[in-house]
């Protein structure tokens, strides 16, 4: 059986038409397939490989930790240096009220933990979320995601979830003394890069404080330099009660976290004790990789150039066929008149060696989220291929 047949017959599929690129290896901004064709990855494996694929610092950290120890105990019992160092690093980087990290394995799991924590802190049950949001595919995370088409087949989901319109200040009265948590992406990713207004986030923060609801920022897609700051909330100067991270956190390894204040986190230790548990969360190899990832971002001062690289790519892509470009840093939605056009352009880009991709809840746009250390030369080459695809299809 050839590789494609095994892939199609023995691996569970989630779409009728997977791209089925047979990966040989990946390095920096490129993925190489088995036939030797190279692809410029302008989506970073969907906002994961922010420092490029297989960065030597990540490989070194993974190897060194794997040789010392891998899994030794379920979460929260043993002192493990990679977890300790990573938690301390995050506490040093984040505002004081975000000084305690709970490490998990994925973005969905980070949000599950955050929602449970908010319920435990407030003793309330209602969750407020936003239309078109995406927070993950597990039952809880799906319940607070705003895409009805993706949810309907899996009901019943969590009860007591209310959806507000993103960026609409009039809707904020929907957050009340009944609300345990408000979960929001400060820049909605899969809705097609929808950027919250400054005044709106200020009002949201104030409303949550007023009624005692926990404000959760899901920065799973926007974190680790993607938008031109380490976290998107830094653009706004608005601090959440709980922060969730994953995707680019591990430099290519699977790790997420929900982060809050130590007193709040302590609510998971009693009534019941072991209020949230995980076997693999905070895996030492992944924690070592995550620490190395942050060090690369800091030492190479990668965030300093995100905005100028984003601007360059935006300028080079500009084309009369484009309806709108929504962008923050190196997080892009390129919008066209029709979803059909987007399908054709993305396909042509991939054929010509540039990986662009669709959004879950915005069919008239395609996404770009290149590694934040992409070279200007690769930006020019990627833009040339995208421009050609647009000219051919429009
Ligand atoms: N939250 C946001 C904003 C996301 O973009 C995603 C994934 O795309 C998730 C949560 C879910 O993360 P994961 O796929 O790691 O469960």
Image: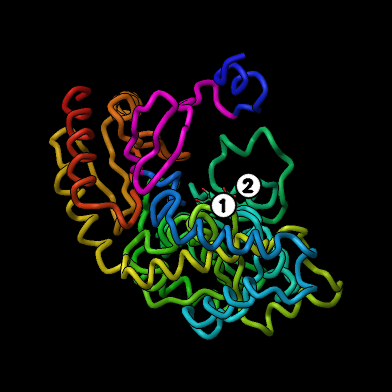
Asked if one can make out residue 363 in the rendered structure from this viewpoint, the answer is yes
Residue at the (62%, 39%) spot, across then down:
151
Q: Is residue 151 above or below residue 340?
A: below
Q: Position of residue 87 (x, y in %)?
A: 59, 76
Q: Position of residue 22 (x, y in %)?
A: 48, 27
* Secondary element at image label 2: helix
Toward the top, the furthest residue is 1
Q: Is residue 142 above or below residue 246?
A: above
Q: Nearer the viewer, residue 264 or 79?
A: 79
Q: Position of residue 320 (x, y in %)?
A: 13, 35
Residue at the (50%, 50%) spot, across then down:
133
Asked if one can make out residue 220 in the rendered structure from this viewpoint, the answer is no
Disc 2 CB within 8 Å of nearest ligand 1 atom: no
For label 2, the residue is 142
Residue contact at pointers 2 and 1, CB within 8 angstroms: yes
Q: Identify the magenta region.
A: 14-42
Of pointers 2 and 1, the one earlier in the residue sequence: 1
Q: Quadrant of the N terminus?
A: top right
The answer to whether residue 127 is magenta is no
The answer to whether residue 24 is magenta is yes
For label 1, the residue is 135
Residue at the (28%, 41%) spot, across then down:
334
Disc 1 CB within 8 Å of nearest ligand 1 atom: yes
Asked if residue 361 lies left or right of residue 245, the reply is: left
Q: Position of residue 86 (x, y in %)?
A: 57, 73
Q: Quadrant of the C terminus?
A: top left
* Secondary element at image label 1: loop
Q: Nearer the viewer, residue 24 or 230?
A: 24
């Amino acid at each position: 059986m050839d590789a494609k047949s095994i892939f199609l017959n023995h691996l569970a599929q989630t779409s009728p038409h997977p791209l089925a690129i047979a990966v040989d290896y990946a390095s920096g901004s490129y993925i190489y397939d088995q036939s030797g064709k190279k692809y410029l990855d302008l989506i970073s494996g969907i906002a994961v490989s922010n420092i490029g694929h297989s960065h030597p610092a990540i490989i070194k950290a993974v190897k060194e930790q794997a040789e010392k120890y891998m899994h030794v105990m379920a979460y929260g019992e043993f002192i493990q240096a990679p977890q300790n160092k990573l938690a301390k690093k995050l506490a040093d980087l984040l505002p004081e009220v975000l000084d305690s990290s709970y490490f998990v394995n994925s973005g969905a799991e980070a949000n599950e933990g955050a929602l449970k924590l908010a319920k435990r802190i407030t003793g309330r049950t209602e969750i407020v979320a936003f239309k078109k949001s995406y927070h993950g595919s597990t039952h809880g995370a799906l319940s607070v995601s705003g895409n009805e088409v993706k949810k309907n087949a899996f009901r019943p989901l969590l009860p007591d979830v209310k959806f507000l319109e993103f960026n609409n200040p009039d809707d904020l009265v929907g957050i009340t003394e009944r609300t345990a948590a408000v979960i929001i992406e400060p820049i909605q990713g899969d809705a097609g890069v929808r950027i919250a207004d400054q005044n709106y986030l200020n009002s949201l923060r104030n409303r949550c404080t007023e009624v005692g609801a926990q404000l959760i920022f899901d920065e799973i897609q926007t974190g680790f330099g993607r938008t031109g700051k380490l976290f998107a909330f830094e653009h706004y100067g608005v601090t959440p009660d709980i922060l969730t991270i994953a995707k680019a956190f591990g430099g290519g390894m699977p790790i997420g976290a929900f982060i809050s204040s130590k007193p709040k986190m302590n609510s998971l230790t009693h009534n019941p004790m072991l209020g949230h548990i995980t076997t693999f969360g905070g895996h030492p190899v992944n924690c070592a990789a995550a620490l190395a990832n942050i060090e690369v971002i800091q030492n190479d001062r990668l965030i300093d150039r995100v905005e100028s690289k984003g601007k360059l790519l935006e300028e080079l892509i500009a084309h009369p066929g484009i309806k709108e470009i929504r962008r923050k840093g190196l997080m892009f939605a390129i919008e066209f008149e029709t979803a059909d056009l987007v399908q054709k352009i993305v396909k042509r880009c991939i054929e010509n060696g540039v990986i662009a991709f669709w959004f879950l809840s915005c069919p008239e746009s395609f996404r770009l989220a290149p590694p934040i250390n992409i070279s200007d030369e690769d930006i020019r080459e990627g833009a040339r291929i995208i421009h050609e695809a647009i000219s051919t299809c429009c």
